[in-house]
Image (spheres, coloured by chain):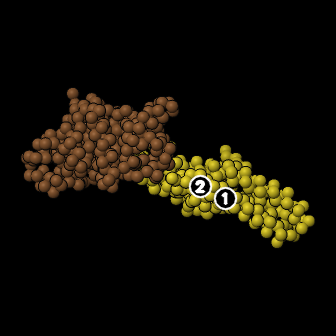
């Protein structure tokens, strides 16, 4: 018990790194997802293709390969230099972005065409229609799936430990090796992930109620 | 000078030609009812008048502006042409008041207070002032359609297009909506109404257009068209619906 208490500060430090990376990556990922979804739905064929290739490439390769490609592969190019945190954030963001884009696309397409027709018939531009009419309704519908993908992305951050990022999982490994308290340490690490994800679920439930369609 | 001129209008969906050669003129303050069997192209015709459907051929001129010109800012024209849909298409995530104020505030940069004041006036006009804070889901079909009319009127349009506005309503709701439309007609709004309400067409319409198979088959003042149809297709249609 005393050992756990003494290493808890390290694990909490790791948790902070995990949350820091997750918070930035998920916001970036959502923006990437939104842009890619709009590309996918745009009337311009070339943008459709870019979006489709991006999504297929990310969905068709393992996360860890994407991470190694970005961190080791791209870094081997002379004029590119990324530290491991940046590479980690970018990988999680791009990966989440591809999945988000499909969620957002489906959400936008699920909104009745009559909504757009009504908005456009009033003289709103297609951008205003997206912003004030379609996206707010689509977002409400997408929330459960977005929550799901966010949880998957949070868990994916644990893989960043392999490129030496001192996240929660990495701290667990270090402390387990140093103290031989593997059982207690990995149990604690698991509980910490669980609590964070549970809080995320509660937040999502709260948002869902907030945006409840009347 | 006609406020709407339609010249050789054609519209195809893929290989299916829905509008074959439509010519029509509508004068200011005129109320024109469009009737015809389903699939005759009457809704498509209406939707071409604000370019909700891409126009395949011909010209549609609204207040002197040819809306088939791709360089024209269609949003400006649409602000002058209100539209009411069969399925209402109210914005379910916004209150009745917000439904009405959104377009004036965003498309025309009307101030919030001015837009709200105008919205409440319009709600009073359609008899729903007490519903300002409600959400569309809390309204009956007839109430929704009256809100939709108020929403379109909030842009102070010169022309109002109605696409079967009472077809999705329970029979006891139809009267309230028609009453609002009748009031609008009396106030001098230019209206084009696709409808199955022959009573309304007869009473309120200045002119009735009968469409079939993508053509305007016959048009006349209501008394004449209903009591003395010239074309046999008009006769066949009216014998079924009257």
From the viewer's perspective, tell me whether residue A74 is left or right of residue A130: right
Q: Point out the tag, 2 or 1, that comes first from the N-terminus.
A: 1
Rounded to the nearest angstrom, the CA distance separating label 2 from label 1 is 11 Å
Which residue sits furthest bottom?
A183
Colour applied to chain B: brown
Placement of the N terminus of chain B among the 4 image quadrants: top left
What is the chain identity of the residue bearing mark 2?
Answer: A
Task: Give the colour in which the image draws chain A.
Answer: yellow
Neighbourhood count class around disc 2 (C-alpha, 10 Å): few under 14, some 14–19, many 20 upward: few
Residue A128 can be seen in this image = no
Q: Nearer the viewer, mark 2 or mark 1?
A: 2
Q: Secondary structure at mark 1?
A: helix
* Percent position of residue B169, x then y: 33, 53
Q: Is residue B158 visible?
A: yes
Mark 1 neighbour class, 10 Å CA radius: few under 14, some 14 to 19, many 20 or more:
few
Please tell me the numbered disc located at residue A209. Answer: 2
Q: Which residue is mark 1?
A: A202
Query: Which of the two residues, B224 or B16, is positioned nearer the viewer here?
Result: B224
């Amino acid at each position: 018990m005393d050992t756990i208490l003494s290493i808890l500060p390290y694990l909490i430090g790791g948790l902070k790194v995990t949350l820091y990376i997750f918070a930035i990556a998920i916001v970036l990922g959502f923006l990437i997802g939104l842009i890619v979804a709009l590309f996918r739905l745009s009337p311009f064929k070339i943008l459709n293709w870019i979006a489709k290739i991006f999504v297929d490439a990310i969905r068709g390769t393992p996360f860890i390969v994407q991470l190694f490609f970005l961190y080791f592969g791209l870094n081997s190019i002379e004029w590119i230099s990324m530290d491991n945190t940046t590479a980690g954030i970018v990988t999680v963001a791009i990966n989440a972005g591809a999945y988000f884009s499909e969620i957002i696309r489906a959400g936008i397409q699920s909104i009745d065409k009559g909504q757009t027709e009504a908005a456009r018939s009033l003289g709103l531009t297609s951008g205003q229609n997206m912003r004030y009419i379609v996206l707010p309704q689509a977002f409400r519908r997408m929330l459960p799936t977005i929550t799901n993908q966010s949880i998957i992305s949070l868990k994916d951050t644990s893989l960043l430990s392999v490129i030496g990022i001192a996240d929660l999982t990495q701290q667990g490994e270090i402390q387990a090796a140093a103290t031989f308290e593997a059982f207690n340490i990995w149990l604690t690490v698991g509980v910490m992930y669980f609590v964070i994800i549970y809080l995320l679920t509660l937040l999502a439930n709260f948002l869902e109620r907030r945006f409840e369609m009347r | 000078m006609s406020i709407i001129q339609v010249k050789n209008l054609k519209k195809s969906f893929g290989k299916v030609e829905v509008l074959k050669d439509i010519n029509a003129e509508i004068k200011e303050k005129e109320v024109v009812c469009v009737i015809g069997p389903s699939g005759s192209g009457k809704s498509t015709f209406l939707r071409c008048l604000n370019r909700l459907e891409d126009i395949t051929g011909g010209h549609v001129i609204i207040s002197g502006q040819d809306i088939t010109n791709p360089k024209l800012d269609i949003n400006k024209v649409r602000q002058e042409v209100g539209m009411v849909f069969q399925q209402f298409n109210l914005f379910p995530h916004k209150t009745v008041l917000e439904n009405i104020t959104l377009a004036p505030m965003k498309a025309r940069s009307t101030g919030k207070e001015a837009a709200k004041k105008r919205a409440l006036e319009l709600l009073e006009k359609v008899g729903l002032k007490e519903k300002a804070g409600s959400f569309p889901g809390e309204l009956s079909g007839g109430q929704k359609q009256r809100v939709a009319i108020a929403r379109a009127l909030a842009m102070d349009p010169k022309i109002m297009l109605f696409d079967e506005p009472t077809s999705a309503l329970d029979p006891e709701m139809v009267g309230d909506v028609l009453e609002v439309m009748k009031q609008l007609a009396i106030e001098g709004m230019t209206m084009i109404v696709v409808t199955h309400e022959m009573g309304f067409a007869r009473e309120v319409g200045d002119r009735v257009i009968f469409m079939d198979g993508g053509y305007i088959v016959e048009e006349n003042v209501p008394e004449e068209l209903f009591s003395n149809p010239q074309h046999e297709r008009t006769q066949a249609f009216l014998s079924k619906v009257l």
